[in-house]
């Protein structure tokens, strides 16, 4: 593959279109499953999972936005909607008084625990169904490579 051509070659174009179909279609499918089985959106679920895995089930808003690769304003709007439903609460960060901390509530915990089995089942069927260990190992290497390349590009864009 040459990297000096201005366009993707035919093979790269086919793979890129498949990538777009999967990366756009999978979240839509997972969102439909969550809407059918729970009262959560995929975005709700992502926030709840992040908080459920965090120490003390809380995170600074800025750190959460960075970890989720979301704009702070997008996360702020999402948190406002979730706060109104009692899933999370925001509080001042006691360590410096400037930042905000978002904390999982009991209702948020109950919601993520109820949603997780159906979500995991859908991911297992759609993403991992039919893949053997060799496929899974290769997919992991490919995705890790892409993630590392993205991190390098983000660093160069931020410099």
Image (tube, rainbow, N blue to C red):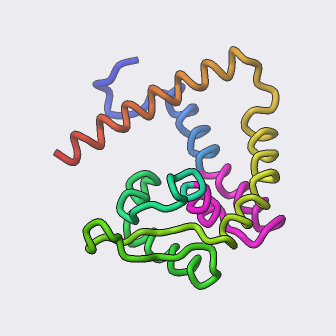
Residue in the foreground of this view, choosing between 138 and 8: 138
The rendered magenta stretch, by its main secondary structure, is classed as helix
Which image quarter: residue 95? bottom left
User: Which residue corresponds to the image point at 60% horizontal and 62% vertical from the top-left?
Assistant: 48
User: Which residue corresponds to the image point at 76% horizontal and 46% vertical from the top-left?
Assistant: 120
Say which quadrant the N terminus sits in: top left
Above-or-below relation of 124 to 55: above
Which image quarter: residue 20? top right
Relative to residue 40, is residue 88 drawn left or right? left
Say which quadrant the C terminus sits in: top left
Above-or-below relation of 112 to 6: below
Rendering coords of residue 64 (x, y %): 43, 58
Above-or-below relation of 54 to 133: below
Which image quarter: residue 105? bottom right
Relative to residue 90, is residue 107 drawn left or right? right
Query: Per the image, is 47 magenta?
Result: yes
Above-or-below relation of 22 to 110: above
Residue range corresponding to the magenta coloring: 24-49
In the orientation shown, which residue stands out farthest toward the top?
134
Residue in the foreground of this view, choosing between 80 and 100: 100
User: Which residue corresponds to the image point at 76% horizontal and 68% vertical from the top-left?
Assistant: 35
Residue in the foreground of this view, choosing between 139 and 58: 58
Rendering coords of residue 16 (x, y %): 53, 36
């Amino acid at each position: 593959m040459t990297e000096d051509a201005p366009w993707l070659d035919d093979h790269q174009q086919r793979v890129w279109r498949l990538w777009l179909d999967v990366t756009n279609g999978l979240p839509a499918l997972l969102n439909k499953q969550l809407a059918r089985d729970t009262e959560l959106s995929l975005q709700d679920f992502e926030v709840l999972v992040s908080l459920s895995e965090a120490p003390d089930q809380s995170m600074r808003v800025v750190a959460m936005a960075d970890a989720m690769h979301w704009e702070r304003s997008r996360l702020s709007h999402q948190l406002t909607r979730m706060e109104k439903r009692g899933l999370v609460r925001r509080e001042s960060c006691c360590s410096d008084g400037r930042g905000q901390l978002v904390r999982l509530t009991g209702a948020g915990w109950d919601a993520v625990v109820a949603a997780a089995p159906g979500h995991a089942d859908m991911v297992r069927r759609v993403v991992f169904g039919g893949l053997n260990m060799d496929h899974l190992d290769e997919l992991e290497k490919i995705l890790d490579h892409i993630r590392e390349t993205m991190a390098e590009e983000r660093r160069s864009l931020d410099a």
